Each structure stands twice: as structure tokens, then as C-alpha cells.
Amino acid sequence: MLINFNSKYAESFVSDDELNAMAPVAVKALETLTDGTGEGSDHRGWIDLPVDYDKKEFDEIKKSAEYIKQNADVLIVIGIGGSYLGARAVIEACKSSNYNLLTKDTPQIYFIGNSISPAALNDVLALCEGKDIAVNVISKSGTTTEPAIAFRFFRELIYSRYPKEEAAKRVFCTTDKHKGTLKALAEKEGYKTFVVPDDIGGRYSVLTAVGLLPIAVAGIDIDKLMKGAADARTAFNEKDINKNDVIKYAAIRNILYNKGKKVECFISYEPSMAMFNEWLKQLFGESEGKDGKGLFPTSCVFSTDLHSLGQFIQESGSTIMFETALTFRSSLSDITIKEDADNADGLNFLAGKQMSWVNDTARKGTLLAHTEGGVPNLIVEAERADEYNIGYIIYFFEKVCAVSGYILDVNPFNQPGVESYKKNMFALLGKPGYEGEKERLENLLGL
Ligand code: PA5
């Protein structure tokens, strides 16, 4: 197995008896998922996606990525939640969090429409000055307010820059196959469209066109990404907790949850994994947090956050949390610390050492400290953050999340709670159809 799941540092918190009791529940949850007998079973398209995807569309994605690479300095990706996090996570993980500053052969990629901040929008508009641009607007529903507002601005920009026919060629829409405002607009204007399959929800959609087009534009090999996911698909089917780390991890996190560890902190030792942490937070948070249940997912990048949240984790973390570290055996690049004649900084004890070794040693020290502080630690270890391994890891976590949701007895594929803020926002904004609610909310706000 490509991933090594290490639960040794949680053993003093989870007894064999507890694991033995949870094992059949976890196996049942896996069966519920694979048999399609659970709630939300019509949203399991991601399970076979790594092998059962639209090959023709896959080729079209590659062609469009080539077109964008040839014709644009900047790709603007417009989307929110599952419609942008996966792409951004993979690009930063496989390339760098400084991708836009470092890229030479592939377009810069800016993500917008993931907030309603005018400052963020103005920044990205300014970044497009003097640059050839292309836009990939992504919305499964095709009606989400945040990307819709951003798309209006970037459509205006693109039509102000290029003749109508060329402008249309620079817009790529990823949305529902048949319905939604975005689909209708794309048809009317003649934009190239890609499909978000009906049976795949936003947070499970990174390996569809949603993620694949921006990822391919960044020069990342999407065949390798899919191959990694395909290999993970075959690796995690065993109905035995000792042979399947998906169910082992799902079981342990539920045991810890039942014992009061309501917070799971995803840890990385690479700043380039910060967005992957964000993707994990959405995946688990939206999938499990419902019906008054669910682990609260949060994240840290160490050693950075050891100098901010480390104090809390060490001395108070034991009351609420456990950590799951995603680590890599080898770094995407490395550097050797040199000998210094004066040794004025006192660092010659590290001379000749690789920085990756120092990072890993810090990891080991932190692992022991936090475990001693009463914070159980789980480790998911992979070889390196390349396309293949990242595809594998994505699939692993997706499956853990779905199995874990069924252990928790929630529907891991819906997100009814996301609608509440939208209803209030629409009413307060004066959207037609929400008139009655507007007055009530304004009274509550004292307006
Ligand atoms: O996981 C989800 O379903 C959500 O996070 C959606 O991706 C997000 O709300 C954006 O929705 P849409 O793609 O319909 O614009």
C-alpha cells in the first residue's frame, strides 16, 4: 500500500477492546457505502470515477488546457467551496504555494468568486492588467451568488479586451450537464462547457473537470493524478480492519470522537499543503457536521503554527482534540545546510544536514511532545507530493470521510446547513421572492 497509516501514537488513547467493538461498525459502514444502501447513495459517483470517467471529455480538458496555455498569461478560476478548493490544493501541493510567482511555462492561476470581498475582486482585476486572460467559471448548481458576481466582472473584462468571437473562446464553464443559469448562459454565448456529473457532489469533485482543467493548465499530469486515485480505488476494499486503513482510520477517529475528542486537526509540515488542509476541512466538515454530530476539522502547518497554536495544543489540546498528520517521506526539493566559518549563529551542529531531515526531526519531536501532552496522533505517510501520490491521497481521504460519515450515522453527501445563510443573505439583499423575510430579518438586526 502506498500510504502508511500509523496509529501507534493513538494507542494509549484507544484500547484494543474499543477498536474490536468499532471494527464491525466500520465494516458495516464500508458495506453501506459500496452497496449504496445508505443515505445520499445517489452521490457515490466519485467511487468509480478514477476508472469510469468520460474519456472523451478528459481529452477535451487536455485540449482546452493546451489552448489556455498557448493563449493566456493568466487563468482566472471562478468558484467556491468544492468548486475551487480541490484544484487549488493540488496545484499548490504538486507545484508550490508560490506557483504564481515561480511559473515560467504555464499561466498564472488566480482563484476568485470564493468570497464577496470587493478588495479581493479588485486585486485580481488589477493582476490581469496588460495580460492575456482566460476564465474557467465553475459552479455545479450554476446559481451560486459568489461566483456569479465575480463572473459578471470577468465577462465584462474579457469582452472589453477581445472581439466577441475570441472572447467566447476564452471562457470555459464547468457546470451541470443540463440545468442552471450558468449552463443557459454558456449555451447562449457559445462557451466551451465541461460537466460536473450528477452523482458527484462539490467536495468530491476534484477529479472531475472541476479540478482537472485548472490542474492541467498548471502543467500537472492529470493522467498520473487519475492513476494514483485508480490505484487507491483498488487498494481500500477489504472488509477487514487490519487489512484496510480506510476503515481503521475511520474507526479510530470515531472512537476518539466518542471519547470527547471532537476536534481533528490536520497537520502538515509543508506550507504548500495549506490549501490541501483547506480541502480536507471542507470534505470532512461538510460531510460530517450535521444532525448535531460531527468532528470539527481544523488544520495547522508546522512548524509555523507551533509558534501560534502550539501552546494551546500542547497544554489544552488534550481536552478536545487529536491530530492527523499528512507527511511525506521525501520532499519535492531539498537543500543542504552549509558549514559557516564563524558559526556566529551557532548552527554548525546542523552543517551538512539536509533541511528535510531537520523538518522531519522537528516532526518527530512534536509528535512525542503532543502525544505526551495527551493529544492522540495519527499519521498518514506517503512518498512525496507528486501527481500520482496526491491522486492516491485524495481518494483515500474521500473514502475515509464517506465511511466515517456512515459510522456517525449521517448522510455524508448532503449539506443542508449551507442554505441558511443564503436565505438570509438573499432576503436582506432584496432578491425577488424573499420579500416577507426581509422585514423580519431587518427587525432582528435592528435596522
Ligand atoms: O461541496 C459542495 O457541494 C459545496 O461546497 C459546493 O461545492 C459549493 O457550495 C459551490 O456550489 P456550486 O458548485 O453549485 O456553485
Image (cartoon, rainbow, N blue to C red):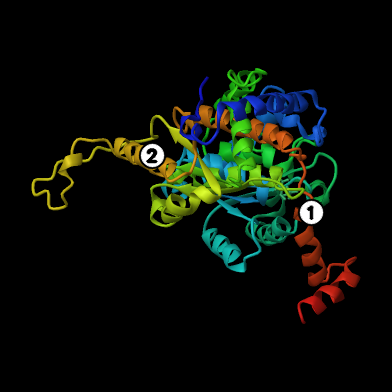
> Residue at coordinates 75% horizontally, 30% vertically from top-left?
45
* Foreground pick, 141 / 278: 278
**Disc 1 to disc 2, C-alpha distance:** 48 Å
Q: What percent of the width, then of the height, locates residue 245?
A: 58, 25
The answer to whether any part of residue 319 appears in the image is yes
> Residue at coordinates 82% horizontally, 79% vertically from top-left?
443
Kindly identify which numbered label has been placed on residue 368: 2
Above or below 260: residue 435: below
Q: What residue would you read off at disc 1?
A: 143
Amino acid, disc 2:
Leu
Q: What percent of the width, then of the height, locates residue 176?
A: 79, 42
Q: What percent of the width, then of the height, locates residue 58?
A: 67, 29
Ligand 1 within 8 Å, label 1 CB: yes
Q: Is residue 108 left or right of residue 112?
A: left
Say if mark 1 contacts mark 2, CB within 8 Å: no
Amino acid, disc 1:
Thr
Count of picture labels: 2
> Residue at coordinates 61% horizontally, 47% vertically from top-left?
262
Q: What percent of the width, then of the height, locates residue 296?
A: 62, 49
Above or below 119: residue 420: above
